Amino acid sequence: MARETVKDASADQGVSPAEVDAVLDELGVGLDSDLISVLQDVQERMGYLPADVLQGVSDRTRIPLSRVYGVVSFYAQFYTEPQGRHKLKCCRGTACYVRGGEGVIEAARNRLGVEDGESTKDMMFSFETVACLGACALAPVVVMGDKYHGMATPDSIDEMIDEIVDAESNKEETN
């Protein structure tokens, strides 16, 4: 299933037809385009897959919209709602669970004030749990952005989040 909705998100995040066309033109989407590659490229560009863009992909590739949505909802990598600038993924697999992963997940939930699949109100963070991150020897494992953090603890979650918040605050001060 596609990811959950954004916590307290504002009204519909629609994209204008001109924006849809511009993105799809830039990516060269057409009849011979590979659906998964197109979806990955669009999401990389826009941060998520808005409904209007999925309709545009369907129109250009002549792949039925139901099939496009089927692919988007099947793969956990695709998001149909806006995501936070920083994504925190916590493993809930067996090795992580046995080594204290539930406490790490709870610490992330409490610190961010969101549930699994949600984003913070300021869209700084998205949080989700995943079945396995494939690094069981480092359990419990979390991924912040693209960086794996092994042997995570509730304190290390706070440190990761503090580091990002501080970096963003410093970036705002210099602008």
Image: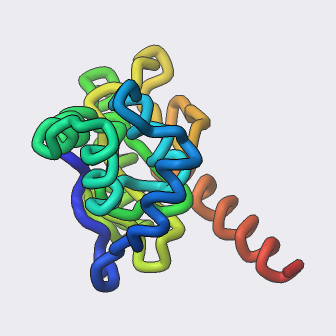
In the rendered image, residue 40, in percent from the top left (x then y), is placed at: 44, 37
Judged from this view, the residue extending furthest toward the right is 174
Quadrant (top left, top right, bottom left, bottom right) of the N terminus: top left
- Colouring style: rainbow
In this rendered view, identify the residue nearer to me: 92 or 13.
Answer: 13
In the rendered image, residue 112, in percent from the top left (x then y), is placed at: 42, 67
In this rendered view, identify the residue nearer to me: 21 or 133.
Answer: 21
Taking the spot 35% from the left edge, 35% from the top edge, the residue there is: 91
Taking the spot 15% from the left edge, 40% from the top edge, the residue there is: 64
- Residue 101: tell me if it is visible: no
Q: Is residue 150 left or right of residue 54?
A: right
- Residue 66: tell me if it is visible: yes
Q: Is residue 60 left or right of residue 168?
A: left
Q: Is 6 rendered above or below residue 174?
A: above
In the rendered image, residue 56, in percent from the top left (x then y), is placed at: 32, 53
Taking the spot 46% from the left edge, 46% from the top edge, the residue there is: 42
Quadrant (top left, top right, bottom left, bottom right) of the C terminus: bottom right
For the image, the number of numbered tags is 0
Taking the spot 69% from the left edge, 59% from the top edge, the residue there is: 163
In the rendered image, residue 72, in percent from the top left (x then y), is placed at: 25, 41
